[in-house]
Amino acid sequence: MSSQVKAAALREPLVRIAKRTDISKGQAWAIRAAAILLALVAGGLIVLAMGHNPFLVYADMAGGALGNKTGLKETVKIAVPLLGAALAIAPAFKMKFWNIGAEGQILAGGIAATYFALFWADKLPQVPLLLLMFLAAAVAGAFWGLIPAVFKAKWGTNETLFTLMLNYIALGIEQYLQNGPWKDTKGTGFPIIAQFAKGARLPKVFGVHAGWIIVLIFVVLMFLYLRYTKQGYEISVVGESEPTARYAGMNVSKIIIRTMCISGAIAGVVGFMTVSGADYTLNANTAGGVGFTAITVAWLAKLNPIVMVFIAAFLAVLTKGSGTIQTNFGIPKSMADVLTGIILFFMLGCEFFINYRLIFRGKGEAHHG
Amino acid sequence: MLRQWGPREAIGALWGEEEQRNEGARSPAKRAKDMELAPTIEVRDLEERTAIRLKDITKTFGEVVANDAVSLDVDWGEILALLGENGSGKTTLMNMLSGIYFPDSGEIQVDGKTVTVRSPKDAFGLGIGMIHQHFKLVDVLTAAENIILGLKGQGKLDRKAVARDIKAISEKYGFDIDPGQKIYDMSVSQKQTVEIVKVLYRGANILILDEPTAVLTPQETDKLFAILRNMKADGKAIIITHKLHEVMDISDKVAVLRKGKYIGTVNTSETDPQRLTDMMVGRAVSLDIDRPRAEHRNLRLEVENLTVLSGEGVKMLSGVSFSAFGGEILGIAGIAGSGQKELLEAIAGLQKAQAGAHIRYFPPESEEPIAGKHIPVKRDGEELVGKNPTQIEKIGVSLAFVPEDRLGMGLVAGMDMVDNMMLKTYKNGRGPLVDRRPPKKLAEDLISELEIVTPGVGTPVRKLSGGNVQKVLVGREIASSPTVLMTAYPVRGLDINSSYTIYHLLNEQKMKGVAVLLVGEDLDVLLELCDRILVLCGGKISGIVDGRSTTKEEVGLMMTHLPGGREASAVSVLQAGRTERGEDQ
């Protein structure tokens, strides 16, 4: 034992962790930027291992996504639903209501919009029809968000599982419609839904469907809503501490339900934009995982709508660029997913360095005084 | 493993038993080695009287220097009281001794040898055992199971041997413990006993008790001190941290910390509470709390037959009836978890009262200065039962509840002062937008009036020190000019100066004619500040006494006994202990 004590006396732990209290917002974002850079380096190493020059590959990705008009349009088209869904998730997540059901809410909105596109196109002119589709999608999305919110507020059910399961129900309904009542009778016999009539399509502005204008308006509204409105304030308080919200006289159930309606409604509108602006039809791929990727976007942006614009754009560039490098280098398209995964890993990891710093053995003295 | 205890010769017979107990946990080879080494230790013990020596220990957390070059000595067979206000660094220092934190610089010596304590396991290896403020026990296990938890065994658990060993320790020092009792069936003081036996069982010879009397009644404290004296006689070195008062009874030496700095060590016999307070605070402080008599003393609140159930349907309050008057501070005493929280919350509309309860509110008379600031209500008693918190707040009943974790309710930790100021008023003004100008003004006013230390109104309150957080909360409640002000533990975690600021604020409210309900844990303070004291015992009122004429002993006795000399039913006391534990977490 005495030898053990002696040995211990000489050994201070190699690395110790100390909490940071003094980090500024700028520093925190600098650490996050460094994390993205490091993630790109790590991704580059993988590219290198595959036998390609990472610089050329990255340059080709950027060029394919941003370098020409067609590529740019495609990139924006990818970014729009991503940003929209991230905005939808933001208020729910701010309230610590883990809505992972944006996928289903998008589909619900898409289904509602498609109903009017298919059966009302010949009865209404374009503008009222589109407005009707917009509203129907918002209402349907809100309803799909309302269900888990009511259950959570009244009976305390787990919203994560609930919203997730609702995704599959929405998908099931879509499949049923596609294979049954809404199946295109004039087509080839494949179970698909007919292309929308001209009047049910979102017009293009600068070559991309007008959805991009809608989401940018949503960005501003959501930013103002969360930061400057009474309802936004309530969301923050409920998210921080439900007992405090009750103590302040807030009706927590009402706030949960209302917020999820807003969250679902925005997701529903994303569904409308996808069916009416991008695909001109409804299919099982209408949501296409956007509802899940949006969680990444919202989280990386720390639920700040303005920052979400950049994160969504960045992920869209990765996705579009991966298509380009597949053509030019024969690198599988899933490289975008690999890169996104690496970036997410680094971003989440860097939060540790924002909150803590490491003190290495023997360097302890340098830090205080 | 070899333990470097002190005066082993004095310990005698028990040693044999403890040694046997340890054998079960170690290999025969090691055991043999221990025995071989034993004589050499005794030789060294004769030379070394110092159990623990800390030299220039420094620890920082970010910018905060929690301990600044602290040095102290404890001899074997000595009780050292480590005295300091909250935030002075007592717990940090003890945590370094027990291996939870690692010092930035400085040296720890145990029994004359420089050691490095990197983990609680290291600390146990050196015979150091710490009893934390918040117990670390598994509720569903028995005392014995908790005591042996985490010890390496030989595969087979000999419960009989364990129980025998525990009994031996208990008899030696005077513990009252049933090894087979489950933790959830225990009162707070029984749980503390298990914690102490746990470290003794593991062979600790240096015991650290972090504010052990904070959760005990005066009677339980006496019992604990008797045990500590037995252990001291047995040659163990004991460090006990505290804020004040009791240290005079028990300690041999008192070491004082102030704001992380070591101020000095004095012999207890050569000092007195006033001198120690001066050392702690750094200048002479009057220990007297003002208790003026208010001009207006009108009935404000009449609670009748109030019963409140917990979420699990357990009666937290049972048939409680009392009156509160404007211009008086009504103290509420009781063991933690006796229904204090439920009482205040029920009045504030946050807890559902069972049928048959009445809470009647009588508005202030029109000639009183506090009259007319809230929505008008019936003069002959407005029923509060059935109203929601917002309605009750508008009537003028304000709850400044400082919960156990200080930021759990009442303030939003992640928000800044401005956003916290408007927690109850954010709905004011028309339109969907919040108006942050009035709360900003209020925040700035509070900062200057209450001397709140913060980088600015935009700093999250989580980053403020405990005292400042409390000032923010109590300040906001007082700013709503209430006619009933309810507050629980308003000075918990505050230094002496801040505590007096809060007492002063409460007195100011009382003199204005406000009815102040104060749940407190420090009986000395309640006795000096309150006009009347309501004592709760297991959810029932065991009596209401006059603050000017009662004694600490009387109140202490009422905390555990219901009127008629009847001891509180086992269930209600246990229930109190259990809830207390729940709130801690």
Image: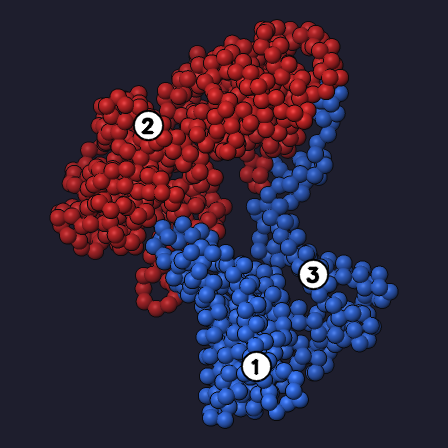
Chain colours: A blue, B red
User: For mark 2, what is the residue?
Assistant: B569
On the image, the x and y values in percent for residue B119 come to: 64, 30
Q: Quadrant of residue B31?
A: top right
Q: CA distance from mark 3 to mark 1?
A: 38 Å
Identity of the residue drawn at 60% across and 57% down: A26
* Residue A341: mark: 3
Pinpoint the chain carrying mark 1.
A
Image vertical order of residue A229 relative to residue B440, above or below: below
Pinpoint the chain carrying mark 3.
A
Q: Nearer the viewer, residue A294 or B385?
A: B385
Image vertical order of residue B528 relative to residue A212, above or below: above
Q: CA distance from mark 3 to mark 2?
A: 60 Å
Q: Residues within 10 Å of mark 3 (few under 14, many from 20)?
A: some
Pinpoint the chain carrying mark 2.
B
Secondary structure found at label 2: loop
* Residue A180: mark: 1
